[in-house]
Amino acid sequence: MILSPGAVPLADLERLWREGEAPRLDPAARGPVEAAAELVARATSGEAPVYGVNTGFGKLASRKIAAGDTAQLQRNLILSHCAGVGAPMPEALARLMMALKLMSLGRGASGVRWEICALLEGMLARGVTPVVPHQGSVGASGDLAPLAHMTAVMIGEGRAWHQGREMAGADALAAAGLAPVALGPKEGLALINGTQFSTACALAALFDAFRAVENSAVIAALSTDAIMGSTAPLVAEIHRLRGHVGQIDVACAMRRLMEGSEIRESHREGDPRVQDPYCIRCQPQVAGAALDVLHTAARTLEIEANAVTDNPLVLVEEGRIVSGGNFHAEPVGFAADQIALALAELGSISQRRVALMVDPALSFDLPPFLTPDPGLNSGFMIAEVTTAALMSENKHLATPCVTDSTPTSANQEDHVSMAAHGAWRLFRMVQNLSVIQGVEALCAAQGIEARAPLRSSARLREVLARLRQDVPPLAEDRYMAPDIETAAALVREGALVAAAGLEGFR
């Protein structure tokens, strides 16, 4: 995969994250990178103080550093900032973070030598992945601690994975035929001052959130057939009159998925119900709104992924090195909070459909808790309770993080974004949502099968067949947890969406 700095689309980043491709910078980036490095080299030999080149950092920026100490300054910066704690990032996520840093450096405004970019490329190509604890960043001044752990491996320190084993960073480089670098002026600062940890986490969650909307359309269509719901609320003109693109797209997808359902046709006439509950009737409005929010977050994150976010920045055409604040991850924090709201709402409406299907007073003649022999068997009674627990947990996790600033670094960095844990918490939300949607799929399948000999649509029958490959119908109570996890895994992997032939909403 060739990365063109400033112009890498989200589709490429998702492929890199899911499939583990080894990216390289477009060779055309080398000229601008080297021009910026030359300007930094000139500044190093001058008398004027330039932040991060010949000064201390943060509150210590007023301390001038002697020319002979600038290399030690950068090394000390990395070692002192390796203060992260907590479980490490998954390898695929750490690789995405490395690729984002490579893209940023490739813009030619960070002042690093080409050798730094080449080492990142080599590590990605040869499978050297730094062990990066996920806690320790407040999202300004950049993701300092996580990126320091990444950079530590580049200088022969820290820990890394290579060929499935964790080892010392120096050993991992040697095993891959790579050599550590001695950081030059500003290079350590350029590597750790940026939003790449927060952005990588938010991007990975965004990709899964789009898949969750796709799952929502497919599984909601199953649930609508299971309770013998109406397709009148999916009529195209209703949604065109409102005009929201996400709503229009979700309704269109559900119409196509349900087309030809015998179950639907069986109750067009003589149905005593006038309207379905909102969790059925308003699915396009809710999932569509979530989809629109995700598209807004995607635009922000695509810009951020291609941005230069370290400090100071090297303005080659002007011949200046200027301090700014692009490291502040406020845009990523807002995007992460938006994604969290979308995930919470997708889970909320999905859980209500689970509750609808297990309740004999509301499910239109489905057996209580979807078991053929209620009383002796409890069926999906407690599976529904699990979805309620996870729905509530996601509501709490959806509380905004970006508003929770606190001053750090002796009040020099007195407003921060909290984007790092705002993005990290999304993985827990995605996991919870996949369980909720997996249980909904199981309930909907059980409900549709209870409508036999009437059949669902051809496309939804393909979804049922795919689900039943791994999870058989619930004839009598059995150990439930493996069924739930299997269904959740099918949701996360996109297997049900693929079986439905849904084109997606990207």
Image: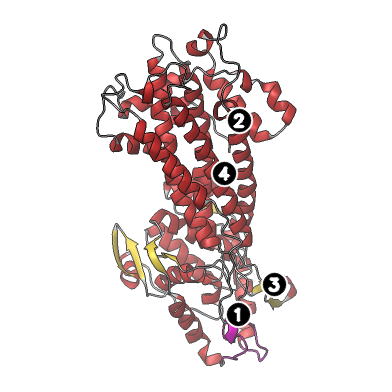
Q: Are marks 3 and 1 in contact (CB under 8 Å)?
A: no
Determine whether the residue tagged by mark 4 lies in a helix, strand or loop: helix
Q: Which mark is residue 342?
A: 4
Q: Are marks 3 and 2 in contact (CB under 8 Å)?
A: no
Q: CA distance from mark 3 to mark 2?
A: 47 Å
The C terminus sits in image quarter? top right
The residue depicted at 36 percent of the width and 31 percent of the height is: 381
Q: Which mark is residue 315?
A: 3
Dominant secondary structure of the residues highlighted in magenta in the image:
loop
Magenta range is 45-65
Q: CA distance from mark 2 to mark 4?
A: 13 Å
The residue depicted at 41 percent of the width and 54 percent of the height is: 92
Question: Residue 214 at x, y = what percent?
Answer: 52, 34
Q: Quarter-wise, where is residue 504 in the image?
A: top right
Q: Label 2, on which residue?
A: 284
- Taking the image as drawn, is residue 494 in sight? no
Q: CA distance from mark 1 to mark 4?
A: 34 Å
**For marks 3 and 4 on the same chain, the one whose residue lies earlier in the sequence:** 3
Q: CA distance from mark 3 to mark 4?
A: 39 Å
